[in-house]
Image (spheres, rainbow, N blue to C red):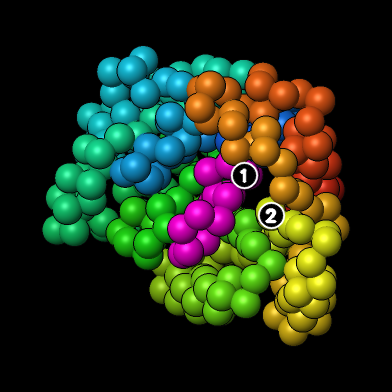
Amino acid sequence: MGRQAKVIAIVNQKGGTGKTTTTTNLGVALGKLGNKVLLIDMDAQGNMTFHFGIQNEYTKSVTHVLTEDANLKEIAIKREKVYIAASDVSLADAEVNMVNADQREFILKNAVDKVRDKFDFILIDCAPALSILSINALTAADHIFVPLQMEVLSMQGLSQILETVFQIKETLNNKLTILGILPVMFDTRRTVTHEIHKHIKENFGIRVFENYVGIDVKLVEAPSFGQSIYDYAPLSVGAMAYMRVARELISVLP
């Protein structure tokens, strides 16, 4: 059958949870492990595009893919062993236009299916809100992966994510599975961190990754330089953490 990309949506309906940091650095880590990786920026804020420093380097973006004016392979820009489908504020306009489109939930899936045989992994950085863009990402994906801070409010958000996934499975994408939860900004010094971590493992019935991403200022600094953690600080604890996560992710994939 040949190459067929694993399509993974990086999801959290709460902002500031490390979604873009995870998509960027996990993607580059997978690339460094010898995989061909496409990263899709499905957020009109274009944070991942900014993270790679390519905000002024593309002529066509995800917006053009969603309006069927371009395909994903054609618009992708190569950086640090990965390909990035960039995004910007025009995506918000595309979202408005998609509302009245035929088969609107499947627009991204159709675009992704055309390039599945060109990549090993396709990671989608989703917007924090549940919108037609996010629904497109979940309809296109095989799996979702949830970066999660070990905080009380995060558990509430997790329940919302599970409900959304259930609805998508029932109506649009019965193959969608939850690959797991990745503890991020994990502060080992706080008792509450460990308590919530334990509670999620015992009560939600979802895989919680053995590896976690701790607090590392280098991860925060890297986007300012338009680089992943691997170009900016390859020996940092954050770089090593995401490489361990990438290896674990490969090991748990069906």
Q: Nearer the viewer, residue 222 or 117?
A: 222
**Whether residue 38 can be seen here:** no
Q: Nearer the viewer, residue 21 or 120?
A: 21
At 46% from the left and 64% from the top, the residue drawn is 13
Question: How crowded is the residue under tag 1: few (<14 C-alpha within 10 Å), some, or many (20+)?
Answer: many
Q: Nearer the viewer, residue 12 or 221?
A: 221
Please provide percent x and percent y for residue 72.
40, 30
Please provide percent x and percent y for residue 109.
41, 48
Number of the label disc, if any, that sits on residue 225: none
The reply to whether discs 1 and 2 touch (Cβ–Cβ < 8 Å) is yes
Q: Does residue 192 lie above or below 130 as drawn?
A: below
Quarter of the image for the N terminus: give it: top right
Q: Which residues are magenta?
A: 6-23
* Total labels drawn: 2
**Whether residue 234 can be seen here:** yes
Does 22 appear in magenta?
Answer: yes
Residue type of the residue flagged with mark 2: Val
Label 2's element? Answer: loop
Number of the label disc, if any, that sits on residue 22: 1
Number of the label disc, if any, that sits on residue 184: 2
